[in-house]
Image (cartoon, rainbow, N blue to C red):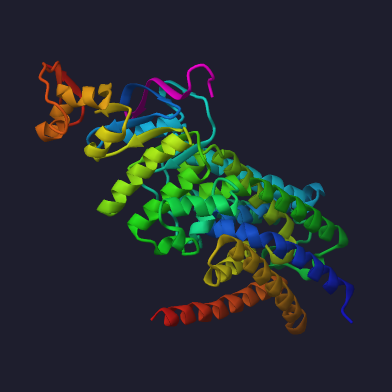
Amino acid sequence: MFDDFFIRALVAGIGVAFVTGPLGCFVIWRRLSYFGDTLAHSALLGVTLAYSLEFNIAFSVFIISSLIALILIQLQKKTNLPGDALLGLLAHSSLAVGLVVIGFLTFIRFDIMGLLFGDILAVAVNDILIIWIGGALILLVLKLIWKPLFASTVNYELAEAEGLNPDRAKAIFTVLMAAIIAISIKMVGLLLITGMLIIPAAMARNISDSPQKMVIFSIIGGLLSVIIGLFSSLEFNTSSGPSIITAALVLFILSLLKIKQTVQLKN
Amino acid sequence: MSKENNILVKLNEVGIRQNDKWLVKGVSLVVEKGKIVTLIGPNGSGKSTTAKIALGIYKKIAGQVEKYTNNVGYVPQKISIDWTLPLRVNDFMLLTENLKDEAVNEALSLTGVIHLKNKNLGNLSGGEFQRVLLARAISRKPDLLVLDEPVQGVDFTGEIALYELIKKISDTLNCGILLISHDLHTVMSATDHVVCLNGHVCCSGTPSDVAKNNEYKALFGEQASQTLSIYEHKHNHVHSNDGEVKKN
């Protein structure tokens, strides 16, 4: 049968997919792909911090990513720069600073490839606990803020006028984004986390006609990507992150066939 | 809801400044249970802005808003929905409240779009979408309805039917309605109180009072005022193009 490390990676990956599915839908709906990227890039700083202070990685990534999100909101208020420029500024500078700090920490051996692209060998039992407990918390909070978050995603003024407090929901969602990055970084790697959020959700968009269906298909797509990706990672000895994302891409391409069919039906 | 006097929302000298210019200023009005208050005025006179102030969408305002209900239905003037969202009419109906299916069906039937329930929102025509917006706003049986040009893009016969429906809703639900409309005919026949805006309150009162008012005539022309009686009295100010007030 399979080695223990592979089973651990599979259990961890399945946990991640359950959470990235619904969050990924919101990332697409609210056009937050680059925001997700920025938080993920800043995660490298969190990782170096964790190594140098011998601290839990997920927790330290969560703190740093939340901090970067806060800085972004402040910069948006205080400067006249457009949002995408600020995102680029924060993403690349935090990645660069993270890499520079790694350069100074010569006494610790880093697996940079593992950090950037994920490493199934690195998933330990306590990582699984963090993923499943953290993931359950994220989903619970998302369920609680679903109504105001979804309503304000459709139309902010309707949500505000009818008393749903969309600003609070948006702030909480930002924290959830930092949390999902923190718990999935070991599996997928920081360069590819946004792919895990967007690609299954984009696949789901192609084959859904309602938000609920899109969330469900997005979860299924994520699960299939993790399972197929991890098996091929084992088979072909490739990094786990790229294998999972490639599997997700294949599913996305297959979903395009469905669009083509519906278009033909209309004609 | 304030028990003694049926007031749902009360604006007291509200205004909002943007880039050192007042969008609206010094607006006071009261919407009570079972009453229809209509805002009229030319483009850019601050009708939608006033409605949004009443709804609490704008936070940094001058003056005070006293709101006595949280059960509000809103039909915005412009709504841009992002089509990255797969959204059917039924999903849209449940946007801000978990309604029972019967309530959804009832509201959609009232506005004549029950057959569109499972259609994608992006595939509706302008008039159909407007009917869905109105259905969504009334489906939660609100205490206060804020309708910003609720029948724009609806065909002529539909328009009359929808205004009759709005009147009926105000009677059956006993809710207060803040209505913004360009259609002076309808305004004059179905409204309890008219507020004529042009950056500030030009005149207000019952429809017949307003129709007699000279500022109303100056804004909408003689023709409009002929819908009711004509009554002459002296202007005390005119408006420049940016809405600023000049004394005569």
Toward which corner of the image does residue A241 lie, by quadrant?
bottom right
Magenta stretch: includes residue A68: no
For the stretch drawn in magenta, what is the main secondary structure? strand
Q: In this view of the protein, which residue sits in the foreground, B194 or A24? A: B194
Residue A261 showing in the rendered view:
yes
Q: Nearer the viewer, residue A85 or B78?
A: B78
Looking at the rendering, the stretch of residues picked out in magenta corresponds to B1-20
- Residue B78, position as x, y percentages in the image: 36, 47
Q: Quadrant of the C terminus of chain A?
A: bottom left
Taking the spot 51% from the left edge, 42% from the top edge, the residue there is A159
Q: Position of residue A178 (x, y in %)?
A: 66, 50
A48 sits to left or right of B62: right
In this rendering, the answer to whether A187 lies above or below B13 is below
Position of the N terminus of chain A by quadrant: bottom right
- Number of numbered tags placed on the structure image: 0
Q: Position of residue A20 (x, y in %)?
A: 66, 61
Q: Please state which of residues B184 and A68 is positioned toward the viewer in this rendering.
A: B184
x and y percent of residue B72 in the render?
Answer: 50, 36
Residue B16 colored magenta?
yes
The image quarter containing residue B126 is bottom left
